Image (cartoon, helix red, strand yellow):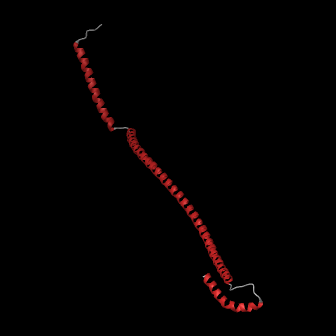
């Protein structure tokens, strides 16, 4: 089955094959250089778009990280604002409570002042009545003293009344002096 071929033929075929392969690789490299010089403009556009896409992806990643940072800052700011709002609302409720207490205190103070004024008026009236009662008491005491000493005698006759009047005038001046002293 094997045909015996002369050695020369095998060598020539091998040499032809080797030369063909060398020529093909050389021509291929020349064509590649020629193709590199004469590129398709769409390839350049595709490469440019690829580069822009990579840049856009990197900017997008940067933007996402920046967005996450801003969201974190927004959350912190929101929490801070809520805390401040809570503090402000607490302060306002305390202020309203204090102002309500102040109004109540002012009203109570006014009521107490009016009550104090009423009591002072009552006290003045009571002192005046006490003085009147003391005066009446001193007059009554002086009268009883006169009756007890016999200076005043209500059981008298008309003749005795003239004599008693003269005697009483001298003594009544003394009794009215005593009454004045007692009222002081």
Pick the residue in front: 106 or 61.
106
Residue 18 at x, y percent in the picture: 25, 22
Up the image or down, 42 lies above or below 102; here it is: above
Up the image or down, 127 lies above or below 23; here it is: below
Residue at image coords 29%, 26%: 24
| Left or right of 93, for residue 57 | left
Residue 19 at x, y percent in the picture: 25, 23
- Across the whole image, how many numbered discs are drawn on residues? 0
Up the image or down, 96 lies above or below 145; here it is: above
Image quadrant where residue 123 sits: bottom right
Image quadrant where residue 102 sits: bottom right
Q: Quadrant where the N terminus lies?
A: top left
Task: Give the residue at the far top of this rendering.
Answer: 1
Residue 11 at x, y percent in the picture: 23, 16
Q: Quadrant where the C terminus lies?
A: bottom right
| Left or right of 100, for residue 163 | right
| Left or right of 101, for residue 83 | left
Image quadrant where residue 118 sits: bottom right
Pick the residue in front: 109 or 81.
109
Residue 151 at x, y percent in the picture: 68, 86
Pick the residue in front: 54 or 92.
92
């Amino acid at each position: 089955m094997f045909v015996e071929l002369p050695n020369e033929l095998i060598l020539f075929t091998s040499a032809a094959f080797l030369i063909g392969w060398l020529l093909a690789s050389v021509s291929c490299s020349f064509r590649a250089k020629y193709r590199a010089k004469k590129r398709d403009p769409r390839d350049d556009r595709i490469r440019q778009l690829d580069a822009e896409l990579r840049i856009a992806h990197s900017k997008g990643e940067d933007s996402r990280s920046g967005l996450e940072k801003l969201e974190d800052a927004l959350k912190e700011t929101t929490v801070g604002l809520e805390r401040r709002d809570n503090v402000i609302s607490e302060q306002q409720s305390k202020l309203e409570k204090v102002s309500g207490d102040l109004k109540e205190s002012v009203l109570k103070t006014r009521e107490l002042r009016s009550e104090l004024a009423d009591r002072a008026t009552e006290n003045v009236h009571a002192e005046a009545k006490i003085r009147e009662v003391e005066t009446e008491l001193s007059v009554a005491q002086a009268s009883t003293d006169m009756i007890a000493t016999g200076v005043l005698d209500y059981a008298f006759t008309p003749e005795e009344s003239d004599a008693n009047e003269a005697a009483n005038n001298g003594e009544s001046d003394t009794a009215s002096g005593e009454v004045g002293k007692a009222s002081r």
